[in-house]
Amino acid sequence: MSNKGLTILQLDLFYCNTVDIIITKHAYERARKRMSWTADAFKRMSEKAWTNGLEHKNTKGQLKHYIDDLWTKYETANSMRIYGENVYFFRSIGPDLCVLITVYKIPTCLTKYLKL
């Protein structure tokens, strides 16, 4: 099973209350590099992002423009959430399963537009 160079060996599955989330090795590496998070912290934040995060359709203004630019880079992603000061890109595989592809930190100049 492979998807754009990601093999099953590079994935980590964990369960949250609403959906099973698979986190790619790439997403772990980005969280470590961009936010200095441990794997456990990243799992907690990923679950919170999926369940409580702001969806792409609910953004506007400069924040929406920034998100739109990032969105075009990840054609495999079909769902995005903003939680805290970070943007999470997911791919929903079914009603109870999604893959977290990557995470970005929102630039400081745009954090004033966040509602969370």
Image (cartoon, rainbow, N blue to C red):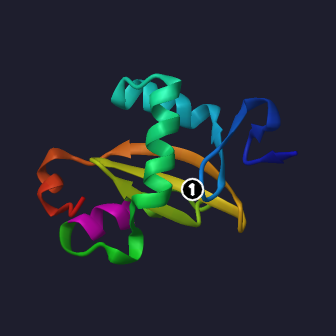
In the rendered image, the quadrant that contains the N terminus is: top right
Q: Quadrant of the C terminus?
A: bottom left
58 with respect to 26 (left or right): left
Identify the image quadrant of residue 25: top right
Q: Position of residue 51 (x, y in %)?
A: 48, 59
Q: Count up the numbered dots.
A: 1
- The answer to if 65 sits in the magenta stretch is yes
| The one of 53 and 77 positioned closer to us in this rendering | 53
Mark 1 residue type: Phe
**In the shown orientation, is residue 15 left or right of residue 72?**
right
Mainly helix, strand or loop, the magenta region? Answer: helix
Residue 17 point in image, percent of width and height: 59, 53
The residue shown at (35%, 53%) is 83
Residue range of the region highlighted in magenta in the rendering: 63-69
Q: Which residue is mark 1?
A: 90
For the point 53% across and 36% down, the residue is 43
Identify the residue shown where x is 72% and y is 35%.
Answer: 11
The structure residue drawn at horizontal position 54% and vertical position 65%, both measured from the top left corner, is: 79
Left or right of 61 on screen, residue 39: right
Q: Quadrant of residue 23?
A: top right
- Residue 90 position, x and y percent, is 57, 56
Helix, strand or loop at disc 1? Answer: strand
